Amino acid sequence: MTKRFYLETVGCQMNVLDSELVAAALLQAGFQRTNERRRADIILFNTCSVRQHAEDKIYSALGRLKHIKEQRPDKLVGVLGCMAQKDQEAILRRAPHVDLVVGPGQIGGLVAMIEELQRTKGPQVAVGLPRRGHARHAVAQFFTLYDPERVQAARSQRHRAMVRVMLGCDKFCTYCIVPSVRGPEQSRPASEITAEIRLLAEQGCREITLLGQTVNSYHTTENGRRLRLADLLERVSEVPGIRRIRFVTNYPRDMTPDLLQAVRDLPKVCPYLHVPAQSGCNPVLKRMKRGYTAEQYREMLAAIHETVPQASVTSDFIVGFCGETEEDFQATVRLTEEARFKNSFIFKYSPRPGTKAVELFPDDVPDSVKRRRNHELLAVQNRISEEDNRRFIGKTVEILVDGPSKAAAGAESETAAGKSDASTRRRADTGKLQLTGRTPCDRIVVFDGQADWIGRFARVHIESVTAVTLFGSAVSVES
Ligand code: 5AD
Ligand code: SF4
């Protein structure tokens, strides 16, 4: 009998991509996907460790599965991704009914592990070497590049895909668990990346998002020549069929002039730059070990606007980081006001065991203060987003139609300015389908259309806006 798997994903786009690859491997091995947890023979969680909240949700989901597993011991439960790498065997102590613990570097072996479990009893644990106490190259071997042939059936959208260009991170910002759970920074060879994008384009993909924790730190050598992200963008631009190229997430210090010129000069590269500032206060940035000052961040913004005047810039912020005073927080508010980000993802600081911040600084900002600062910064950002969106009223924008409009539930952030607007749920009363798509500068557009427009480019005349959405009417759709 065909086995059914259920796969739930939390966390960043890197996790979404990993889940796509896991689903592809399972489909190819003859498993079937189900969206109903209770009907599944294999229940998998692809997890995130960036904040405590994300972990708590998984542990409570695992807790709820305990009695199901008692009744149906043949069902398999697996924890994949960052939590698997961070907590390792400790997951089995908290949830002894878990069968599989598989780190992000080991998910390529998942199918073999499932097969092994059918032969042997007892849990299977596959995780990478920890970074502390081990040489970089030794750890890197546990975080191998896992980007096999892209299986179209495993992708949620035919016209859009993510492509990993780098693994891991070496920046070690003091609050961040990512370098520990996703291993050392490694760039993929450019030829491998473009081959994957060619394949995706042949499958009908029109928009590519290049992924890396610090994507603009991308560098590799090819025939003795050093290649950077700007060179890679040029190569990807040459792939027939690809019409739009995005890249996330950028590290402020690596936003070099050659990259900005590439964004300006390559028409397929979208003028959209996600460059997290994290804070606008120098002592806080220093404790975070971000490697820049607020002034340097402002200079980087000025360089973006000078070279790519039409660029929209977005940011992440952490509020209530260790030692953040009211005055420090106000410096972040000022930066947000000056920078006029398109939107910002705002997070309350969550101490992560295993990071430098937990070792060095007390988590001394009360949760109530973190929450208040989160709301205050969000209100400032939303006001700016709405004001800037108003400039679009009366204009016609080009969008790639993504699908039926729905409220974007389950956004990664606790408060994602730009993600949870109830008005995006408005249903049209015309019988037509309410669709959504994005502009090159990554603004969400909602309009009425037809199901067969999905995956096509359309021009939409904007009539009204909120902080997070532009509403309009379709003027034309590409055949
Ligand atoms: N607490 C809160 N937010 C965090 N981020 C990373 N680590 C933490 C943490 N310990 C945020 C940063 C990062 C985004 C992906 O998550 O803003 O850019
Ligand atoms: Fe984490 Fe900093 Fe690396 Fe981003 S750059 S993944 S915040 S350590």
Image (cartoon, helix red, strand yellow):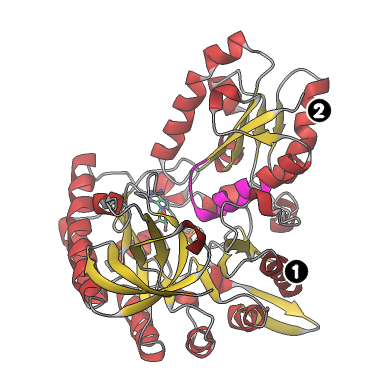
Mark 1 to mark 2 CA distance (whole Å): 31 Å
Q: Which mark is residue 192?
A: 1
Q: Give residue 115's quadrant in the image.
A: top right
Asked if the stretch drawn in magenta spans residue 208, the answer is: no
What residue is shown at x 44% (from left), y 72% (from top)?
A: 458
Q: Give residue 291's quadrant in the image.
A: bottom left
User: Which residue is at the front of the view, 226 or 452?
Assistant: 452
Highlighted range, magenta = 9-21
Q: Amino acid at mark 1?
A: Glu
Q: Which mark is residue 204?
A: none
Numbered disc 1: secondary structure = helix
State the image coordinates of residue 478 (x, y, percent, origin top left). Answer: 50, 75
Main secondary structure found in the magenta portion = helix
Numbered disc 2: secondary structure = helix
- Check the image and report above or below for 297 versus 171: below
Query: Circle 2 is placed at which residue position?
Result: 116
